[in-house]
Amino acid sequence: MPALPTFLYGTAWKEDRTAALTELALRTGFRAIDTANQRKHYFEAAVGEALSAAYRKGIITRDNLFLQTKFTYQRGQDHRLPYDPCAALATQVMQSLASSLEHLGTDHVDSFILHGPASHHEWTDADVEVWEAMQKERDAGRTRLVGVSNVALVHLQQMKSSGTELPAFVQNRCFARLGWDREVRSFCSEHKITYQGFSLLTANPEVLQHSPFLALARSLAATPAQVIFSFSRAVGILPLTGSTDPEHLKQDLASLDINLPLEIVQGIESMSG
Ligand SMILES: NC(=O)c1ccc[n+]([C@@H]2O[C@H](COP(=O)([O-])OP(=O)(O)OC[C@H]3O[C@@H](n4cnc5c(N)ncnc54)[C@H](OP(=O)(O)O)[C@@H]3O)[C@@H](O)[C@H]2O)c1
């Protein structure tokens, strides 16, 4: 059973380059892959092709790989649905995961994520049905862990107050101007939920263009992106990168070896928001 990953390679928006880039990430040393059964933004079957090539070439084995996929409601999909849209939501969840397992050539994933709740403002009855169905998939051994994505504090609070099982993961876009999603992160740390952060670079140009931050990166002989990723680990964020550049992929992994002094971590955390 693979331990929790330290860095996730994200496979969104890669279309025909998905297989080659996923294999490149694995060859570079990534051991955790994030995908989704949402053809609009991800090409999950091509991720599966990369995995089988990597197994064949001896780059990885299934046992040392962390695989994460997602269930996406119909409104987040285009016409290429991995389930029958007329079926009950619980059935859609089952069909979506069965299709993911086929795409990925495995009998289980390590993490299965609800891509986004049905409403931005509350945890709805639809979410309750989907979340229960996801837990049944977990209990049946088709995923090790279950999680949620694109959630606000209110969703997590409602889950808690209704007494439902809390997620193992929260995967959110992480804005520095919101204190790096401070409220959600603090709920997560209080409830032992692993927070996964995406768009750490693209959502935060004001940090990456801030002269003192650039000077700090230079003084550490690191790239600005590496400082962001290293900072994220230091505050308990499990980062995602979807880099398409071989050098960036190496730099992203190398950021795990950078140890930022506490005062620098605190300085970055309070830079905005
Ligand atoms: N749950 C959700 O709703 C959701 C939404 C969005 C994304 N995600 C997941 O998160 C993954 C990552 O997405 P993201 O939004 O964080 O964006 P991303 O696809 O990782 O893009 C990040 C940008 O940063 C650049 N970059 C990466 N490493 C760099 C480095 N070391 N130095 C300089 N530039 C660097 C990349 O350029 P290069 O290609 O040139 O390196 C790219 O332009 C996705 O693939 C997906 O798996 C999930």
Image (cartoon, rainbow, N blue to C red):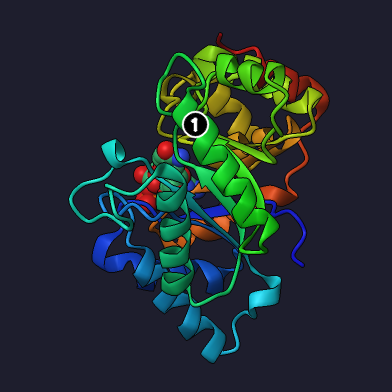
Q: What residue appears at the point 56 percent right and 8 percent down from the top-left corner?
A: 273
The percent position of residue 252, horizontal first and vertical second, equals 57, 51
The percent position of residue 270, horizontal first and vertical second, equals 65, 12
Locate the N terminus and report the quarter of the image it occupies: bottom right
- In the orientation shown, which residue stands out farthest toward the left? 79
Residue on which the image places disc 1: 127
Residue 14 left/right relative to 264:
left
Q: Is label 1's Cβ within 8 Å of ligand 1?
A: no
- Write down the quadrant of residue 22 in the picture: bottom left
Q: What is the total number of numbered labels drawn onto the structure image?
A: 1
- Write down the quadrant of residue 194 in the picture: top right
Residue 3 showing in the rendered view: yes
Residue 125 left/right relative to 271:
left
Q: What residue appears at the point 53 percent right and 91 percent down from the top-left corner?
A: 56
Between residue 48 and residue 132, name the one nearer to us.
132
Badge 1 marks a residue whose secondary structure is: helix
- In the image, residue 183 sits, relative to residue 224, either above or below, namely above
Q: What residue appears at the point 41 percent right and 71 percent down from the top-left corner?
A: 103
- In the orientation shown, which residue stands out farthest toward the top? 273
